[in-house]
Image: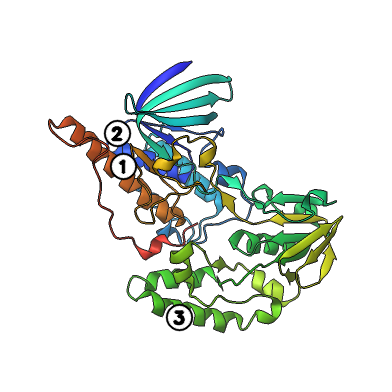
Amino acid sequence: MGVDDVLVVIVGAGPAGLATAACLNKLSIPNVVLERDDCHGSLWRKRAYDRLKLHLGKDFCNLPHMPFPSDFPTFVPRVSFLRYLDCYVTSFNISIRYNRNVESASFDESDGKWRVVVKDTESNADEVYLSDYLVVASGENSEGYIPYVHGLKGFQGEYMHCNQYINGRDMYGKNVLVVGSGNSGMEIAYDLTNWGANTSMVVRGPVHYFTKEMVYVGMSLLKYFDLQKVDKLMWLMSKLKYGDMSGYGLVRPKEGPFTLKIKGGTTPTIDVGCIRKIKKGLVKVYPTISSIVGKTIEFEDGRNGEFDIIIFATGYRSTVLKWLKDYRLLFNEHGMPKPDYPNHWKGEKGIYCAGFSRRGLEGISFDAKRIADDISLAVKARKIPGGKSSHACTLASNSWRMNELFCS
């Protein structure tokens, strides 16, 4: 079993891990990124649908120290974003070890180091990394979540999480139910109708919906006006654009979109054309599923229908608790940071997290910069006689910016 001693271990080579590594490299702090897949940005590369684009303008979503190229469109497509990540890795000389599945990570009190046990899934060899600092960058979206539905296991059709959906090419003429009315759910429902599927969707509660341009305007205004005023303007723009959608099964929340995002991380839906499809009757809206028998799905309002395919756009879960033994130094029992934003990124004994703020790509940049600066201060303090220990150094959190809210 090989043992590597490295100052910083970063778990995960998604945007959060790459951004943190780049910021550390800018400060000449040695680090290594461990990635379970055979590529970086695997969620975008392997588990995203074809038509996916960044839901915010590129000005709000670049990673630290490298803006998007000027010739990129305002709303960057998935393929272009992957090109950007490839260039980012090369430009900052990020060291990534692929096919490394982290099996456990624990803090050793005897030597004050993190012990990270890894399986090289290509060679089947075991590896151990000893580090002063551990950055958890596996993200809040590391595993698709499918909720319990009575009768789902006996469903006689096909069901999947939306991270398995690429496009609707093979779903022409089929009855497809999309569960979830967030960005993925709405966009997949829209895409399915374009491929000729008979599309329905489950909307389980109130939802805000806007065009990308509306959100861009709203976020820009937040630099100059208070939250409540911008929320009211966003509500008015949506009402003027779409009208009253309650008759179609879409009800707006009582609280404004930015307020909801701050309170609970709930992101408003970016409409790419699905609302128009709903109004035309091309997408049927149902409430929560009550049960499934065979291919028949019954809903809470008493309606039912037969479906061939169910696509769950029901979010993701953190997998941190599966491998991080001393998770309580930073995380709660749900695998999310215990401290509230903006102090969520740092725990005890040299553990950090990036990409868990529920604030998308701009939130990732926020995390990466602060983690790198904090580790840099800690390393410098250790070198100064009589200086504070690395785990006592604290970087004061800057006030957060409103444009960290919606990048995804």
Residue that label 1 marks:
372
Q: CA distance from mark 2 to mark 1?
A: 8 Å
Q: As drawn, which residue projects farthest toward the top?
A: 1
Residue that label 3 marks:
233
Q: Is residue 72 visible?
A: yes
Q: Tell me which residue sits at (47%, 44%) in the image.
A: 85
**Amino acid type for the residue under numbered disc 1:** Ala
Q: Callout 1 environment at 10 Å: few (<14), some (14 to 19), or many (20+)? A: many
Under circle 3, the secondary element is: helix
Q: Position of residue 73 (x, y in %)?
A: 49, 59
Q: As drawn, which residue projects farthest toward the left?
A: 385
Q: Is residue 361 left or right of residue 251?
A: left
Q: Find out whether the residues at labels 2 and 1 contact each other: C-beta distance under 8 Å.
A: yes
Answer above or below: position of 13 versus 255: above
Q: Position of residue 188 (x, y in %)?
A: 67, 59
Q: Find out whether the residues at labels 1 and 3 contact each other: C-beta distance under 8 Å.
A: no
Q: Tell me which residue sits at (74%, 63%) in the image.
A: 289
Q: Tell me which residue sits at (18%, 30%) in the image.
A: 383
**Amino acid type for the residue under numbered disc 2:** Ile
Q: Nearer the viewer, residue 172 or 345?
A: 345
Among numbered discs 1 and 3, the one appearing first in the sequence = 3
